[in-house]
Image (cartoon, helix red, strand yellow):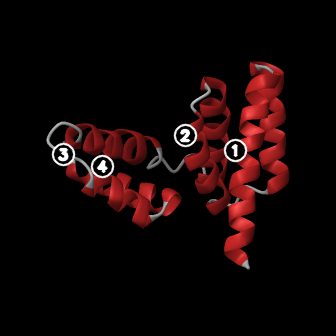
Amino acid sequence: MDKDLFKTGLDKRKATLGAEYVQKSLDGADDFSRPFQEAMTAWCWGFGWGDEAIDVKTRSMMNLSMIGALGKMTEWELHCRGAIKNGVTREELRAIIHVIGIYCGVPQALECMRVARKVLDEAEQDKN
């Protein structure tokens, strides 16, 4: 594994998903899952997110659209939190969900809306 790509990926992953979440994922890895955690950190976060051609806010918006289209709601929730951290606004989240509804169907948009509402409510509680 490319150590520089892993380091870049680890930094990007922590910046978006939170250092505590990432550390818990890495600490929870065993001999079976550790190679995947390391490869995903290097490839997705180091190679993908490490490319500075697209800013993190735009990349978060792209991810929400694609993950929402795939219907992977656990990942969508995680990346919704990260998107907010990366500057995506409530209005932008709503627009992303509208696009998901247009291209992927209303039931999928409703799932995304439920998760977004949960994440937004939690973020609001954290501010208070």
Residue 38, percent across and down? 26, 45
Q: Residue at x 81, y 26 (%)?
A: 101
**Mark closer to the observer (3, 4):** 3
Tell me residue 107's x, y (percent).
78, 24
Residue drawn 33% across and 61% down? Answer: 23
Spatial CA distance of label 2 from label 4 is 26 Å
Residue at mark 2: 74
Which residue is identified by label 3? 30
> Would you name the residue on which mark 1 appears?
115
Q: Are marks 3 and 1 in contact (CB under 8 Å)?
A: no
Q: Is 18 left or right of 58, judged from the image as shown?
A: left
**Amino acid type at image mark 2:** Thr
Q: Secondary structure at mark 3?
A: loop
Amino acid residing under circle 4: Leu
Comparing 43 with 64, the one in front is 64
Cα separation between marks 4 and 1: 31 Å
Residue at image x 67%, y 58%?
A: 84
Q: Quadrant of residue 88?
A: bottom right
Earlier residue among tags 2 and 3: 3
**Amino acid bearing label 1:** Val
Q: Is residue 25 left or right of residue 93?
A: left
Q: Amino acid at mark 3?
A: Asp
Q: Residue at x 41, y 46 (%)?
A: 45
Q: Mark 1: give few (<14), some (14-19) or many (20+) Cα within 10 Å.
A: some
Residue neighbourhood size for the residue with mark 2, other residues' Cα within 10 Å, grouped as few (<14), some (14–19), many (≥20): few
Identify the disc placed on residue 34: none
How far apart, in angstroms, are the residues tagged by discs 3 and 4?
21 Å
Q: Local crowd at mark 4 within 10 Å, few (<14), some, or many (≥20)?
A: many
Residue under numbered circle 4? 5
Q: Secondary structure at mark 4?
A: helix
How many numbered circles are shown?
4
Please tell me whether residue 115 is drawn above or below residue 111 in the rendered image.
below
